[in-house]
Image (cartoon, rainbow, N blue to C red):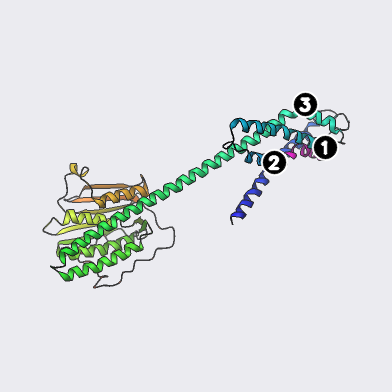
Amino acid sequence: MNLNRVLQSRWRKYGLIFGFWALVAVVEAAQNYASQFVMENHAFPWGLAFRRAFEEWYPWAFLTVGILWVARRLDLERASAKRWFFLHLAGSALLSLVYFAIYAGLLSGQKSVIDGTTFEFGRVFRKLIIYYCHVTVIIYWMIVLAHLGWHYYRRNRERESQASALATELVRARLEVLRMQLNPHFLFNTLHVISALIHENPEDADRIVARLSELLRVSLEQSDTQEVPLRQELSFLERYLEIEQVRFQDRLAVELDIESGLDDILVPSLILQPLVENAIRHGIAPREDMGRLKIAARRLNGMLELKVGDNGPGLPEIEVASHPEGVGLSNTRSRLSHLYGANHQFQLTPAPGGGLEVTLLIPCRTETHASAPKVVVVSHAGANRPAEGMHNNSGGQRAP
């Protein structure tokens, strides 16, 4: 396959070279033919005009191939500039002699349309050297410099492509490091909950272990991708909320306000879980009465807006910006920056009515490939049962 591409590129290059010099010859032929109308005793029929023009210019098509061959081997980056210059200067002189010999040979024996004399090889060769040597040298250097410019252009494009590929790999590596930090953080927090319940309520601890195994399996299945459809993210989040529901019992109410038609919108994998975990830990856990958690998603001016809010104690607006972020929030901010650059927003603000609200604004785009398979969770002690206290608002869709 690569050999075919090389051959195609080479023949395309040769086609351009011979086509260019054919065009130059056609223009010269038209000029020769038109000259008969302004000069007396200068009859130039079409056939003769084309013949003379191609004899003069078409040898350059073959000579150009030779010049490029020499230019590729006299690399300016490997040789000194002085040596490169003098070698090409010698090459231009030699090529001029070759061209004059070819052109004089083609004209030899023909008659001039101006005075009717017969062209002789020796006289034509000497005349070309005297009057046209500078023209051939200029053409030689124009070809060499054009090749040099194209060479540096391609080299620059290759370096840009390599730099872009390296930057992409670096971003991917950083994202994987962030995910590797996030998964243990989530796992350790859940194990801490299990250890607190294992003696007081073994049945609830067993249910959490079952949910945790499902979540870890889903997390491993998504380890090779950075973005998933929103439906998969909500499915994963629902299983996590079932764990928290076991922990808080009737002290946790969750409201999902998901605008319809967003199932296939791509979001960063595991983007909502650390935000919800942070809201539960700092907003719901300190409360003795009912804690409310709201998760919303909607389109907003061509972007996808995700919100996670709680009714906890919150923070004064002046303290929100200076509030230190934990692993979940800091990793979320870093992942968004690596995935979307400046084309996103991440804000932590006081929620209306108390508590805190995290708002994400990311590009609203769908999958470009076939629909990703839905996450199938093996049933364990009611694993497919919706979490108690969870309901959907505004006619939105529940996570599958």
Residue located at (25% from left, 67% from top): 211
Front-most of residues 60 and 2: 2
Q: Is residue 311 left or right of residue 108?
A: left
Residue located at (62% from left, 49% from top): 9
Q: CA distance from mark 2 to mark 3?
A: 24 Å
The amino acid beneath tag 2 is Gly
- Give the mark, 3 or 1, whose residue is nearer the N terminus: 1
Q: CA distance from mark 2 to mark 1?
A: 19 Å
- Give the mark, 2 or 1, whose residue is nearer the N terminus: 2
Q: Residues within 10 Å of mark 2 (few under 14, many from 20)?
A: few
Tell me the residue that label 3 is attached to: 130
**Would you say residue 80 sits in the magenta stretch?**
no
Q: Give above or below for 216 relative to 333.
A: below
Q: Position of residue 15 (x, y in %)?
A: 68, 46
**Would you say residue 61 sits in the magenta stretch?**
yes
User: Residue reaching furthest top?
Assistant: 130
Q: Position of residue 349 (x, y in %)?
A: 22, 47
Tell me the residue that label 2 is attached to: 66
Q: Quadrant of residue 217?
A: bottom left
Label 1: element kind: helix
Q: Are marks 3 and 1 in contact (CB under 8 Å)?
A: no
> From this viewpoint, is residue 346 visible?
yes
Q: Give above or below for 335 relative to 375.
A: above
Tell me the residue that label 1 is attached to: 105
Front-most of residues 276 and 216: 216
Q: CA distance from mark 3 to mark 1?
A: 17 Å
